[in-house]
Amino acid sequence: MDINISSFPLFNTLYNECIEMKEPIDYESQMEICRKIKLLDDEGHEILIVLIAYFHLNVEKGYGLNPFPHQPRMIKQGLKFDMTNFPMLLIKMIYRFLQLHEKKIQDEQFRINNI
C-alpha cells in the first residue's frame, strides 16, 4: 500500500511498522490496549480517533457519512468501540501508537522534572 506520507506521517509510520508484524495481538494485549486507552490524555484520544478514521478511509477504502464502520456506541464521554470489530492490522497500529504515546508522555515528564 502506498499512503501519502505528507498527509499523515504518524499513520504511515505505524502502518509500515505493523504491516510487517506476522503475529496477531493476543487477547491479553488487546485488554491492555483497552486499559491504556482509558488512561489517554486528550491529545492521545484525538489522535486515536483520527487514526481509526484514517485507517477506514485509506486502508479499507470506506466512504460515506460514517467514518467509523466498526460499530461504535455513543456514550457520555464520547465513542466506545468494541475491539473485536477492528481488523487485526488496526489493532496492531493502535497498540504501537499507545506505546509511542506513552513514551512521549514519559519523556515530557522527565524533561519537566529535570528543569
Image (cartoon, rainbow, N blue to C red):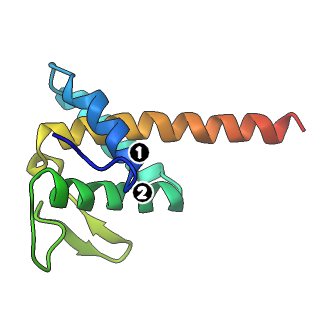
Q: Quadrant of residue 34?
A: top left
Q: Quadrant of residue 10?
A: top left
Is residue 110 found left or right of 44 in the rendered image? right
Q: Check the picture and name the quadrant holding the C terminus.
A: top right
Q: Percent x, y for residue 38?
A: 41, 52
Q: Secondary structure at mark 2?
A: helix
Q: Residue furthest right?
A: 115
Q: Secondary structure at mark 1?
A: helix
Q: Is residue 24 above or below residue 106?
A: above
Q: At x 67% / y 34%, what residue is drawn?
A: 107
Q: Is residue 110 above or below residue 80?
A: above
Mark 2 and 1 residues: CB-CB less than 8 Å, in contact? yes
Residue under circle 2?
A: 47
The one nearer the camera, 92 or 30, is 92
Please name the amino acid that badge 2 sits on. Ile
Q: Is residue 15 above or below residue 29?
A: below
Q: At x 14% / y 50%, what residue is drawn?
A: 59
Q: Percent x, y for residue 74?
A: 24, 75
Q: Is residue 82 above or below residue 14?
A: below
Q: Which mark is residue 10?
A: 1
Q: Earlier in the sequence, mark 2 or mark 1?
A: 1
- Mark 2 or 1, closer to the camera: 1
- Label 1 Cα crowd, 10 Å radius (few <14 / some 14-19 / many 20+): some
The one nearer the camera, 4 or 66, is 4
